[in-house]
Structures are given as C-alpha cells and as structure tokens.
Amino acid sequence: MTEKINAIRGMNDILPDEAGLWEHFEDAVRDWLHAYGYRAIRTPILERTELFVRSIGAVTDIVEKEMYTFVDELNGESLTLRPEGTASCVRAAIEHNLLYAGPQRLWYWGPMFRHERPQKGRYRQFHQVGVEALGYAGPDIDAEHIVMCARLWRNLGVEGIALELNTLGGAEARTRYRARLVKYLERHHDALDADSKRRLHSNPLRVLDSKNPDMQGLIEGAPKLADDLDEDSLRHFEDLQGKLRAAGVAFELNPRLVRGLDYYNGAVYEWVTGRLGAQGTVCAGGRYDGLIAQIGGKPAPACGFAMGVERLLDLMKGGTASVPRRVPDVYLVHQGEAADRVAGTVAEHLRDREISVLLHCGGGSFKSQLKRADASGARFAVIVGDDEAQAGEVSVKPLRELAKQARVSLEEAVDLIKKDEMR
Ligand code: ATP
Ligand code: MG
C-alpha cells in the first residue's frame, strides 16, 4: 500500500464531531461582537516579514524563534505566516486610511502560526479572536474591552477565568525603569539563564516574562515598574481600575505581567485559569499607543486583545455549558424506481420551506435506511416508497418520540414538521 500522508505536527484537523463546538463558539462570538458594535476585518494570512519584526519586536520569542518565515523565490521577498493579528489589522487600517473616517472598532478571527513545541494548549497552527480599537485614548475603551471579555465568558458558560492587570507606563517611565532593572540584573548576572543573559541589554523587560522556574526568585526580587510610573499612565491606570470596580469585574494587580510583544505600553492584562495546566492564559491584551506610528501611520492611540480559541474550547469542554448538537430536521428515506425519481424533488421542496433535509444516497433496504435516519439525529424520517410516489404523498415518521407514522400530502408533511418545531 502507498504510504499515507499525515498533517504537520502541531497543526490540528478539526473533525466534524468537534466542528459543532467550534460553530457554536463562532456564533456566540459574532453575536457578542455585534452587541458591542465591532466590525470585522479580514487580512491575508501571509505578510511581509518586516511587518512583524517592526511591530512585535526583533528581540521577542515570537520573532526570534517562532515565526514561519521563508523567501518567495519569485522575487526574493521574505514572507511570514502571521503569528498574531494586531500587526496585520493595523497595517490594513493604515494602508486603507480607515482612521480618516474616525476611530475604528475592529475584530478579526482566524489561524495564527508559531513554531513552538507542541503540547496541550500550545500548537503551531492555532486560532485567535482579536479585537482592536484604533484611535481611542481610553481608559473608557480599555474598560469596555475587559468588561466585554467578562461578558463573553458568561455567555459561553465558562467559569474560573481571573483577570490580572498591570501598567507598563509611558516610554519615559519605561526607560527609567529599564536602567534600574538592568542594574539589578547585572548584580545577579550569575543567576541568569542563557535567554535572560542574552536579553539583559537588548530587551531586559522580557526577563520578567521568563517561564523558567529557576528564575522566579530573582524575578520576585526585581525592582518594580510602579515606582517609575509617570502621572499620565498612573491616572489612566487608576481610572481604569475604578471603571472595572464600578462594572463589578474583579481583578488582581500583577506587577510582573509584561506581555511577550514589544508594542504594548500603558495598561496590559491577561485572563488566566488554573484549569488548563501550564497553558493557562486564555486571553491577553492591552494598550499599544506607539504601534500605528511605528509601522508608518499617523500617530494614534490604540488598544486591543486576542484570545486563544483552542484554550477556550478546552475550558468549554470541561465545563457544564451544554453545546447543542446540530441535526437535520428530516432524513429522507426512499426506495423503488418511482420513489427514487421524486425523492430529490421532495427534498428540495422541504428545503424551500426552510426544513433541513439529509437525503439518503446509495440505495439499500427501508430497514437499513431507517437505521441511518435514526443515527443521523434527525427529528423525522420522511419516507417515499413507490406507493407514496404514485399518490403524490409521503409518510412522516417521528424518530424522537413514540408517535404514529402518518401518510400525508407534502403540504401536510411540511405543517407537521413545522408544528413540531414550534413546540
Ligand atoms: P503564551 O504565554 O501562552 O505563550 P503569548 O503571550 O505568546 O502566550 P499572545 O501572543 O498574547 O500569547 O496570544 C494571545 C493568546 O493566544 C494567548 O493568551 C493564548 O491563549 C493564545 N496562544 C498563543 N500562542 C498559542 C499557541 N501556540 N497555541 C495555542 N494558543 C496560543
Ligand atoms: Mg508565546
């Protein structure tokens, strides 16, 4: 036998049995975004590498080691499969002058690509839903983003997601803090791991983001950015906290929270859960006031967040929320020459009346077809034999309750099926 071909490691097939949960999630997300007035933007999955280097930052995990980058041999351009969505969203907004029409509330969703070590909750192709508010200075909009996340968790029926909050301050505050932090880290140079030594001068704040357990003591003892904060950032941050308290959203301040992408400043946050093991962050975001200018746009403040869809779905699977299974209204059983001729027409007629129909294909006895009908989850079998075909009628057999089969006209069949829907 010819050898089979498997999917790439860390890139998952979403099979039909699971796709129902994804669709349920996508429907809930669309309704939720609509309720807050966000509009969709769809950008290409492939971008110029330069876009991510300039936005995410050259000295970050993503750009240093996680990107799928290759050279387009036709013109020598370096291209990258998007590792996240904010950069593309901002690029498109600049390219198409969206901000000329005023600030924009946008959202996107789709696959992202990062060359990480695959494990539970960490894949090489994964999905994000992202929300970006471009041209808003906040903190009202920062609060809106957090409040809307809290609502989505409720809508999805997932519990146990906690909010961690921090502020990275303005550029000047960060420069002051950076100097203090470097001094501290230099004093403890011997205790730094290889990654941190490398970052000590290129990107010292990222040392705080290290997941290495051996580094945690050192990180705990590091100076805090809060002591260097400028007044504007402080006021913004306090205002935001007040708005969250007023909205009844609980949070915890985490001075170690720095985020793995360079473009953030000001308020940043993560939604975390203890129920997913090591991959506990389901959603992360914050303010990125410098990014639009950094990739060539007219300076404008902005903020946003992105959630990891696989991790949220894992939470939904482990939770109590029920996910409705999508089943057809009708499984259409047919046997006999005359019956086979009209079966397709009967199915189309039912679909004209907004009844979903799974038309049996491939022949077989009534008995075997009815077995399939039962397994399909359909509420009714509509049966066409030659008798029915000749009389211009059908038999309707309820599959989910003990009720008698009825031989009726097609119009009566529609009424029967629709009446059941109303109950
Ligand atoms: P982590 O610390 O888990 O690596 P991150 O800081 O790299 O996350 P972000 O870039 O902020 O993640 O992406 C936002 C969200 O996307 C994360 O909180 C997470 O839920 C999800 N996510 C990120 N990387 C992956 C991945 N490789 N597989 C699955 N989900 C991911
Ligand atoms: Mg990461």
Image (spheres, grey):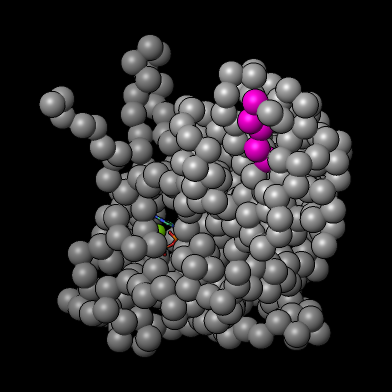
Q: Looking at the rendering, in which quadrant would you find the N terminus? A: top left
Residue 46 visible in this rendered orientation of the protein: no
Using the image as rendered, state which of residue 145 and residue 373 is in the foreground.
Answer: 373
Q: Residue at x 63, y 30 (%)?
A: 385
Is 289 a magenta residue? no
| Quadrant in which residue 101 is drawn | top right
| Residue 120 relative to residue 365: left or right | left
| Quadrant in which residue 73 is drawn | top left
Using the image as rendered, state which of residue 63 and residue 360 is in the foreground.
Answer: 360
Q: Looking at the rendering, in which quadrant would you find the C terminus? A: bottom right
The x, y position of residue 17, in whole percent, is 47, 52
| Residue 328 relative to residue 195: left or right | right
| Residue 257 relative to residue 241: left or right | left
Q: Residue at x 65, y 26 (%)?
A: 386
Where are the magenta residues, as a range? 382-386
Magenta: main secondary structure equals strand
Q: Residue at x 49, y 68 (%)?
A: 317
Looking at the rendering, the quadrant in which ligand 1 lies is bottom left
Q: Residue at x 60, y 31 (%)?
A: 334
Using the image as rendered, state which of residue 389 and residue 4 is in the foreground.
Answer: 389
The x, y position of residue 263, in whole percent, is 54, 54
Using the image as rendered, state which of residue 264 and residue 68 is in the foreground.
Answer: 68
Residue 331 visible in this rendered orientation of the protein: yes
Residue at far top of view: 74
Q: In the rendered view, would you say 169 is above or below 12?
A: below
The x, y position of residue 375, in whole percent, is 51, 51
